[in-house]
Image (tube, helix red, strand yellow):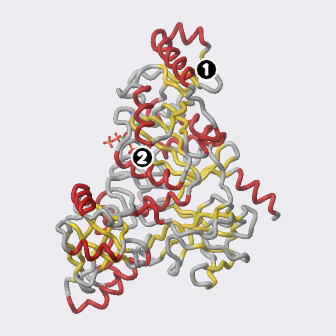
Amino acid sequence: MNGGAVAAEAARRRTFAVISHPDAGKSTMTEALALHASAITQAGAVHGKAGRRGVTSDWMEIERARGISITSAALRFTYRDHVFNLVDTPGHADFSEDTYRVLAAVDCAIMLIDAAKGMEPQTMKLFEVCRHRRIPVITFVNKWDRPGREPLELLDEIEERTGLRPTPLTWPVGAAGHFHGVVERLTGRIVRYERTPGGATKAVETELSPQQAAAELGEDYARAREELDLLEAIGADHDQKTFEEHETTPVLFGAALPNFGVATLLNVMVDLAPPPAPRPDVTGARRPLDAPFSGLVFKVQANMDPAHRDRIAFVRVCSGRFVRGMVLTHAATGRPFATKYAQQVFGQDRATIDEAYPGDVVGLVNAAALRPGDTLYEQQPVTFPPIPSFAPEHFAVARVADTGKAKQFRRGIDQLDAEGVIQVLRSDLRGDQAPVLAAVGPMQFEVVQHRLAAEFGARITLDRLPYTLARRTDAAAEKVMARQRGAEVLRRSDGTLLALFTDRWRMATIQRENPDLTLEPLIADT
Ligand code: G4P
C-alpha cells in the first residue's frame, strides 16, 4: 500500500474520548453515538452499569462487586464513511492514572456537561489534561430535556472555568426541561426534536421554517432568537483554527437519553474534529503519517481474562499500516515484538483485528514487556515522548502481612510500579519494607492489594497517609522539609523527588517560610 492510501485512511479516522463527571451521561452518550452509527442494534448493548443490560467489562472481582468499569479500551464504529475510535475514560468517582493516560491516545475530546450541574470537578480534572496536551474540545451540554441552568449562564461558566471561548454551533429552543429543538447557527436550520418510545431508536427530527417555528414554538422561539442575536453581537462564532489550537470550544445542546442532538454531534465530529496528525517524537520531529508503522502504548491491562493470565497492551497507531502478524521493534529495549494476536477490545467483546491505520487502537496480547508510554515501530526507529505521570492525591504505606512473603511482596510492588498501576515512593527514613504507594484515585490501592495477593501470593496491609498534594521538588527541599509537620519528601522510582503535603494551606505556609523551595506541578512532566 502506498503512502497516499495510508494518509487517506488516516484522514477518515476520528479518535476521541468523552470526558465528563460521573452521571453526566457518558455511558448513555456512548450508547447513543454507537446506536446512531448503527454499530450496535439496541441501546444498552455496549456499556454495562450495575443492573443494566449490557456487556460489562467485569474482568476483575472488584469491578463486579462495584458494578463499574475500571478498564479502558476503544469502541470502534463507522459513520459517513469515517471510522470513529471512541477511547473509553472511566467516569466514576475513583480515578486511576489510566483515566488520564488514555487521553494520550486521542485527537479530540467531547466534554459532556450536565445542564443542571455545569462544570463539575472530574470534568475539570480531565479537562486539565486536554489543556496540557492542547487537545481540541467539543462541548455537549447534556440533559437539556430536564430542568437546568440558563444557556448563557452555562457559556459563561465554561469560559470562566476552562479559559476556552465557547462558540455555540446549536442553540436550544426552550429552556432546560422544555426542550423543543435547536437552531443550527452555521446553517440557520431550525430542527424540532421528538421523542421515540424508550429512546431506543433515533429521535424524530423535523425541520421547521422560521414561520412554523414562530407559530408552533411561540415565546420559546422568540427568546432563542434574541439570544442568538446576542451571540452574533459578541462574535461567538465557530472558528476552525482557534478550535484546533485549543482556544475556543464549539458547544452543542442536547440530551443523550432521548437522542436529541446526537446525530448533530456525529456530523460535527466528521466535519470539524481533527483527524490524526503526524505525532512528534522525543526530538520534536513529527513522524509522517505515511512513514512505516509506529504506535504508542497508552495502557496495559493484565488479567482481563481470568482463564488465561494474559496481558493486553493498547496501542494507538501513529503512523503507517498495521497488519496482524508483523514483527515490530520495542523502542525501549530494541527487542522484536510479534503481533500474531492483535485484537480490538471493548468490554468483553474481542474481535481479531487484521489491519489498522493511524488513529486506530489495537490490543496486543502477550504484552508482558510493554509499558504505558512505550513506542513500537517497524523499520525506521522512532521513540515518542513518555506519557506524563499525574499528580497523585492518595497515599498509603504498604506492608506485607506475612513477613515470609517479603520477597514476593518486593517483586510484586516492582512489577506493578513498572506497569504503571501505582507510583511507588521511598525514603531512607521509611526503609524498603514499607514503601509508600501513591495513587490518583483510591481504587488503585484496591487493585494493588488484589493483584499482590492473587498474582504474587503477598497479602498486604495499607495505612493511609494524610497527604493530598504532591509537587516535584529537589534535594535541597529534603533538608528543609525534614523539619516540617504535615509534609514529607519521598523519591519516586523514576528518581523524581516528590514533596507531599496534607493540604494547600500547609504547602503555602511552608513555601512562604522557605521562598527558595522548588515546588512544581507534576503534570508538566513531558
Ligand atoms: P455516566 O456514564 O456519565 O455515569 O452517566 P450515565 O450515562 O449512566 O447517565 C446517568 C443517568 O443520567 C442515567 O440515569 C441516565 O439515564 C441519565 N441520563 C443520561 N443522559 C440523559 C439525558 O439526556 N436526559 C435525561 N433525562 N437523563 C439522562 P439512570 O440510569 O436512570 O439511573 P441513575 O444513574 O440516575 O440512578
Q: Earlier in the sequence, mark 1 or mark 2?
A: 2
Name the residue at 63% across, 77% down: 340
Callout 1 secondary element: strand
Q: Residue at x 22, y 62 (%)?
A: 502
481 on left or right of 206: left
Q: In what quadrant of the picture does the N terminus appear?
A: bottom right
Q: Dot 2: within a 10 Å radius of its alpha carbon, few (fewer than 14), some, or many (20 or more) residues?
A: many
| Residue 60, position as x, y percentages in the image | 36, 67
Report whether 513 appears left or right of 417: left
Secondary structure, mark 2, is: strand
Q: Are marks 1 and 2 in contact (CB under 8 Å)?
A: no
Residue drawn 22% across and 92% down?
A: 404
Q: Is label 1 or label 2 in front?
A: 2
Residue type (three-letter) at the residue carrying disc 1: Glu
- Name the amino acid type tagged 2: Ser
- Write down the residue under mark 2: 20
Q: Foreground: 384 or 57? A: 384
Disc marking residue 207: 1
Give me the C-alpha separation between circle 1 and circle 2: 30 Å
